[in-house]
Each structure stands twice: as structure tokens, then as C-alpha cells.
Image (spheres, helix red, strand yellow):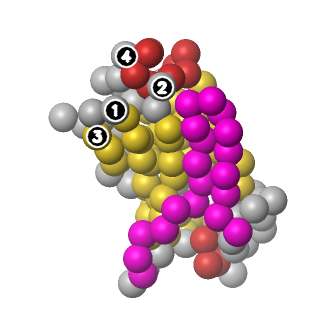
Amino acid sequence: QVQLVESGGGSVQAGGSLKLSCKAPRNIFSVFSASDMNWYRQPPGKERELVATITSGRTTNYADFVKGRFTISRDNSRKMVYLQMNSLKPEDTAVYYCNQVRQDGTYWGQGTQVTVSS
């Protein structure tokens, strides 16, 4: 059963912007609002890496390589989490994954491709 669904990926030139969305359609409100939500990415030929986190208390943390360029946010009423990506670089090219940490386990979306051309 699909727990998380990402959207918003695509191709963009360096310096451009994209906004990724992740929906948790099967979550009930209380479960989603109590979850920590993360965005990970996996560049071609590399390991998956953590990009940004937003906790249930809305504390945010970012990997050094996206600080100042990416913003993570959440809308609990819509069971959505977002990743606004600005000033994109070719090295941001990757499959981006939504991740949810719940009391009953950790869940992943199917990923969305982001390609940044120079």
C-alpha cells in the first residue's frame, strides 16, 4: 500500500527553481502531524543522502549542500510536505524521496526525478 506520493520533479536549467510535494493520502491527521518528515535524494551512481528534515514540532534542518537554497515545509491539514528548491545546480540532479518516520515504522515514497542542466 502506497503511503507517500511525491510530485513536482522535472527538468530545469541551473539557477532555476522547483517545488516538490509529498502527500500521505493514507495517513490520518493525528498520525501525519506526529511524524517527522524528511526529503532524501539519490544522485546517479551515489548513495542516498538526507536533504532536509521537518519535525512534528516544525523544527527544520538542512544538509550543508542545500542550506540557503532549499526550504522544507509542511501542511498537516492537507497531510502534505514540500521542498522548495531555488538556485538549483547540476549537482542537485537526483531522484528525490519523501520519507516519514512514524511510531509504527519508516515509510518511503517512490521518488521523483529532478534534473538540472548547466
Estimate the spatial distance between the alpha carbons at disc 1 and disc 4, rounded to whole Å. 13 Å
Which three-letter amino acid code belongs to the residue tagged 4?
Ile
Q: Earlier in the sequence, mark 4 or mark 3?
A: 4
Tag nearer the camera, 1 or 4:
1
Tell me whether the residue at label 1 lies in contact with that at label 4, contact meaning CB atoms closer than 8 angstroms. no
Task: Write down the residue under mark 1.
Answer: 103
Judged from this view, the residue extending furthest toward the front is 103
Count neighbours of disc 2 (C-alpha within 10 A) and say few if under 14, some if 14 to 19, many if 20 or more. Answer: some
Which three-letter amino acid code belongs to the residue tagged 1?
Gln
What residue is at 67 percent from the left and 57 percent from the top? 62
Estimate the spatial distance between the alpha carbons at disc 4 and disc 3, rounded to whole Å. 15 Å
Percent position of residue 38, x then y: 51, 48
Q: Which of 51 and 58 is in front in this view?
A: 58
Segment tinted magenta in the rendering: 46-64
Task: Write down the residue under mark 2.
Answer: 34
Count neighbours of disc 1 (C-alpha within 10 A) and say few if under 14, some if 14 to 19, many if 20 or more. Answer: few
Estimate the spatial distance between the alpha carbons at disc 2 and disc 1, rounded to whole Å. 9 Å
Judged from this view, the residue extending furthest toward the right is 68
Which three-letter amino acid code belongs to the residue tagged 3?
Gly
What residue is at 18 percent from the left and 34 percent from the top? 1
Task: Write down the residue under mark 4.
Answer: 28
Tag nearer the camera, 4 or 2:
2
Percent position of residue 116, x then y: 61, 71
